Amino acid sequence: MSQKSKPKEEFKTMHDVFDGFTNRAIYKLITQGHFEGLESPISIGKESNVFSALKKDGTRVMVKIYRLETCDFNRMYDYIKDDQRYTKFRRGKRNIIFAWVQREYRNLMKAREANVSVPTPLTFSKNVLVLEFIGDNDVIAPKLKDAIPKKPKEFFNKIIENMKKLHKAGLVHADLSAFNILNYNEKPVFIDFSQCTTFESSRAKEYLERDIRNICIFFRKIGLSAEEAKVKKEITGK
């Protein structure tokens, strides 16, 4: 039986790796019509898993599921507490994760509005985020670390252009590297926006410099001349 025709009665079998709370959040999204069911895992991380999922029309979305028991709540809180959008945030493990997911959705929406190359955020519920599938058919686009661009200089310039757009929108990714950029048909797509923060954060400058350093180090390793000071000036104008 294909994944597409798999009946909803098999939901429990398909999702028995999740806790009951997460299963209910996933099932809610299914009943709302956002997707039919999870397919293969795209990535398995310490804090979240990303799956492909089929919609009724046969197209795919990405479903990012944060693990309630293994997330680094203290690290998440360090980012959230410095975000002016969450000044009335109530601390607590689940509240932290729910805010983290909402924050990633909001950051992606703002980045998308600024024409930054990111997956379109579609919806979220509790600890589950649904995103546009970036890839062809059922094959997800590879991460930059696994797919060296054929024209590194052009790809590097496209990354810097997207960083400029993000900066103009008042955001800094705060975790940008070859691990969080997809190479989709020789074009960069930024992913993983949960740590993204506004420039009102006291650590925004530090995060931007770290993002620039990570990108420059990667491209220098593959033979490109990438000066951090020059890149920073291009992004910020300073």
Image (cartoon, rainbow, N blue to C red):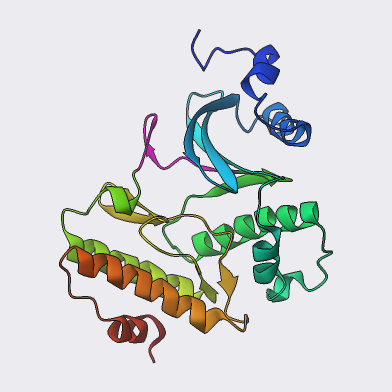
- Vertical order, 36 against 91 (above or below): above
Q: Position of residue 108 (x, y in %)?
A: 55, 58
Q: Is residue 140 magenta?
A: yes
Question: Residue 153: which quarter of the image?
Answer: bottom left
* In this rendering, position of residue 162 left or right of residue 72: left
Residue drawn at (72%, 31%), measured in percent from left and top? 23
Q: Position of residue 56 (x, y in %)?
A: 56, 23
Viewer-nearest residue: 232 or 68:
68
Give the residue furthest to the bottom: 238
Residue drawn at (48%, 24%), measured in percent from left and top? 58
- Vertical order, 134 against 200 (above or below): above
Q: Is residue 210 magenta?
A: no
- Vertical order, 5 against 39 (above or below): above
Residue drawn at (31%, 86%), measured in percent from left and top? 229
Question: Residue 237: which quarter of the image?
Answer: bottom left
Give the residue furthest to the top: 1
Instruction: State the count of labels.
Output: 0
Q: Position of residue 75 (x, y in %)?
A: 64, 64
- Vertical order, 45 against 234 (above or below): above
Viewer-nearest residue: 63 or 72:
72
Q: Position of residue 115 (x, y in %)?
A: 44, 63
Picture quarter with the C terminus: bottom left
Q: Which residues are magenta?
A: 130-141
